[in-house]
Image: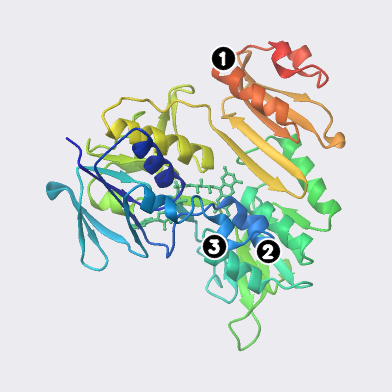
Amino acid sequence: MIEQVAIVGAGQAAVQAIDVLRRQHFAGGITLIGEEAGPPYQRPPLSKGYLAGTVASERLLLRPRTFYEQRAVTTLFGRRVEEIVRRERRLRLDDGRTVPYDALLLATGSRARPLALPGADLDPVLTLRTAADADRIRAACAVGGRVVIVGGGYLGLEVAATLRAQGAIVTVLEQAGRVLSRVACPPVSAFYTAEHERRGVRIVCGAGVREIVAHEGQNRVRAVITEDGETHLADAVVIGAGAQPVTELAAAAGLACGDGIEVDEYCRTSDLSIYAAGDCTHHPSLHYGRKLRLESVDNAFEQGASAALNLMGRPTPHDKVPWFWSDQYDLKLVIVGIGADHDAIVLRGDPAGRAFSACYLRGGELIALESVNMPRDQLAARKLIAARARPDPQRLADPGRPLQDAC
Ligand SMILES: Cc1cc2nc3c(=O)[nH]c(=O)nc-3n(C[C@H](O)[C@H](O)[C@H](O)COP(=O)(O)OP(=O)(O)OC[C@H]3O[C@@H](n4cnc5c(N)ncnc54)[C@H](O)[C@@H]3O)c2cc1C
């Protein structure tokens, strides 16, 4: 009988789990422990509206402060869980307090991947994961200041777009041959490169960073030096080198961890009283027949909900086609599904029109879609991919025809 649920990590997955637990009439105790100072908030605006100063901090909150009280959740914010004592089913916190549990949900998220570079400790060399990080970036990147962003993934490009619109002089250094290389196909990368360059962002690909150097006799950043010896002057450096799952707590407790906390499709870890959800998990995708680690709101939301139902004893496999969005300037990129292992890509529409999709096929089956400013395509794709639709490539390429008509 589950009487006490403890949740470690106060983010998107945790909030969703709490919501589902109470909606499903879980009457036991819920304790939420999060090391950040306040209630859970949305991270996507941190590289967009919040960084631009157009979204206030109170509007970041995932739920109003009253949400937790109304659902009889004991909240311990600004507290870190130091240890899971599995034998006794209790948590040890950084203030020495103990929290007992019958079922535990780990929702510890991910953190910005640090770069072990000479000069990475100079001021200001910043990463972006929390609202406090966004505050630091905003303060360090003044109008007319030179900002070098290391990493041309979605986060680096969103920060580039926001800071450029604020009047900063922005350079993006990407080690790979193209931006967004981990998440998007070459035509989408080329499109985003052109859009950034059109607005004055300098994008340099194939640019591995060798070191960050300071002004003489100071610890203030002066420039970023790439492996080819080129000097990129900078008043501030933002590192966007991806994220890594927060697994130390789980690993120290002896739970199986690889590229994240290992869970099954029911969000169960290798200890059946401990579940995990969100960015911190390495989980199976039944649809794709492989394990995934995802960093997206959708995944945290869906896994949080699924974990809550499972720990209440209502078996609910997590088996959704994942999706993700990125906002840069007036462009909305939505990625649906997992395109790895594709054998063909069909473009719908012309990137020059600033609204197009790239459809990924494997053996004729639609497995993923990347769309720019094509909301109808991405909504249809979610259903078609789940249904393992096999579109006709010629009809698929016709943007005038609804996506579903190609199947
Ligand atoms: C700048 C930025 C922009 C993004 N933009 C998008 C976007 O446009 N679209 C999209 O889909 N996704 C986006 N994401 C990703 C998305 O925000 C994450 O996938 C999502 O927040 C993951 O939620 P989570 O609950 O798994 O973890 P998190 O939100 O990371 O929450 C985990 C919490 O656990 C806490 N914690 C960890 N260990 C402990 C411990 N031992 N004790 C107590 N607390 C602990 C952490 O401090 C953290 O507060 C963005 C992320 C960032 C950083």
Q: Which residue is mark 2?
A: 53
Report the Cα–Cα distance between label 1 and label 3.
39 Å
Query: Which residue is depicted at the point 43% across and 54% down?
Result: 66
Above-or-below relation of 111 to 348? below
Q: Nearer the viewer, residue 253 or 301?
A: 301
| Disc 2 C-beta below 8 A from ligand 1 | no
> Which image quadrant is residue 248 in?
bottom left
Q: Nearer the viewer, residue 358 or 403?
A: 403
Report the Cα–Cα distance between label 3 and label 2.
12 Å
Nearest to N terminus: mark 2 or mark 1:
2
Residue type, numbered disc 3: Ala
Report the Cα–Cα distance between label 2 and label 1.
42 Å
Disc 1, SS: loop
Above-or-below relation of 100 to 27? below
Residue 340 has which mark?
none
- Quadrant showing the C terminus: top right
Q: Nearer the viewer, residue 192 or 340?
A: 192
Taking the image as drawn, is residue 246 in sight?
A: no
Nearest to N terminus: mark 1 or mark 3:
3
Looking at the rendered image, the disc whose residue lies closer to the viewer, 1 or 3, is: 3
Q: Which residue is mark 3?
A: 131
- Quadrant showing the N terminus: top left
